[in-house]
Amino acid sequence: MFKHFLRNSRDADLSVIDEQAIANYCASIARDSLWRVGTLNGLLQKWVALNLPGVTAGCSLYLREHRKPGNTKGDAVRTRDPVKGPFSEEEYTALYSAVNAAYGKGRLPLWMILLTRLLLACGGRIGQYASLKISDFNPQTSVLMLPQIKNGFEHSRVSFLDFDISSQTSQLIVDFYKERYELGHAQDCAFFSTDLVMPKGPQKKIRADDYLFSGHCTPRILSGWFTQLLQEIAPPTARLHFEPIPISPQRFRYTYGTRMAEEGVSQMVIAERLGHVDLQNVSHYISSSPKIVENYDKALSKYLEPLAQAFKGQIIEGEAQSTHKGAPGSRIHDFRVTTKGIGNCAGKARGCRFKKPVACYTCIRFEPWLDAPHEKVLRALEADREKWSDDERMAAVNDVPIKAVKEVISTCIKIWSQRKLEGKSA
């Protein structure tokens, strides 16, 4: 805040900061930015209390006598702001699928899909991920120890909060570690290092090799690159007239807190999971009605559906027309419905850690056969969903694959219908 004050007071004589300098600063910034003065007030009052030169006693008195509006907290969450607030359920699902598809096509690096998943899984601040080291993940237990910030300690690696990571994401992290180790990185190196995040590397070295955070990205740099890369592949949202979903790391944190509140988690647990030291900043997650969100998502889903296609592969005639023509590992099975197979993988399933065939239907490498029993696969997925009917969150896990299977079935029907018409005309 002091840097912001200096940047907006360049034309003034700041050999000493007095009440006139503060008044001019207040006049130079927008009304909705006046909360900055309240934050700046703490520094300047301490400055005067320590009898240090540079700030006048009159400045201190001026600040005490004038009302300083605080930063409005929680409005983006309470109002479900489509730009700054939490993602809707449709946006969450569409964004998750878009990131997976972009990574599969090589448009996003591995660190991007990992940061996206960790933001969704832990809800941490970007500064916590900037402080993360490779050694903070235990591959045996799939537990991530996330460094805590804003806790009053000397630095962010004094206290940690444990998070259980899903098996698929854990395997991706293990693969990521292997790549880093092969490049000569030690266990205590940065998880999201500058050489990894910045394509050309940092312009200059600002941290000594023996410094605790040597090689770490600053939160601003990590946030900037993450936002830039993810915004390029962001799917559309009906809440903004089908413009791309606005991306920021903060929105992932808001989404994490909101989803916990909608699941009935107590304020105490939400505060603990989000790393808050008290409850004053978590009430806004509870204040908005989940029913409103549910109705809103249902109303929007029919408009968003045509723009967020779940099936991203290519239907083929049979295995003879597949990319690898029956090579080992390329055939995809669902033994619940048939022993003959339902399609092929254009990547021969190499390095794939996703559940087959559920995840295959949403994968860009999937080549479903035209005459495979996709209707039976759909019935099996819907039966699995029915088992979780009492838990809407768990039941929704297979919603995107179900949608993808329906799209495959619909496309197959269109192909068969077109062939019948061509046969009659011939």
Image: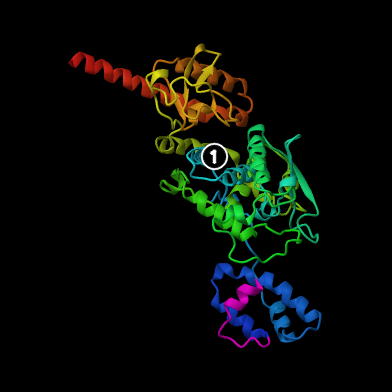
Q: Quadrant of the N terminus?
A: bottom right
Q: Residue at x 46, y 33 (%)?
A: 364
Determine whether 346 is above or below 341 in the image: below
Q: Residue 220, image x and y in percent?
A: 61, 60
Closer to us: 84 or 343? 343
Q: Is residue 108 left or right of residue 16?
A: left
Determine whether 20 is above or below 226 in the image: below
Instruction: Give the residues drawn in magenta, as a range.
Output: 1-16
Q: Residue 262, image x and y in percent?
A: 64, 39
Closer to us: 17 or 232? 232
The residue furthest left is 426
The residue under label 1 is which amino acid type?
Answer: Tyr
Q: Residue 98, image x and y in percent?
A: 49, 40
**Colouring scheme, one of rainbow, by chain, secondary structure, one colour:** rainbow
Confirm whether the magenta stretch covers residue 311. no
Determine whether 350 is above or below 328 in the image: below
**Any part of residue 69 in sight:** yes
Q: Quick one: SS at disc 1?
A: helix
Residue identified by numbered label 1: 96
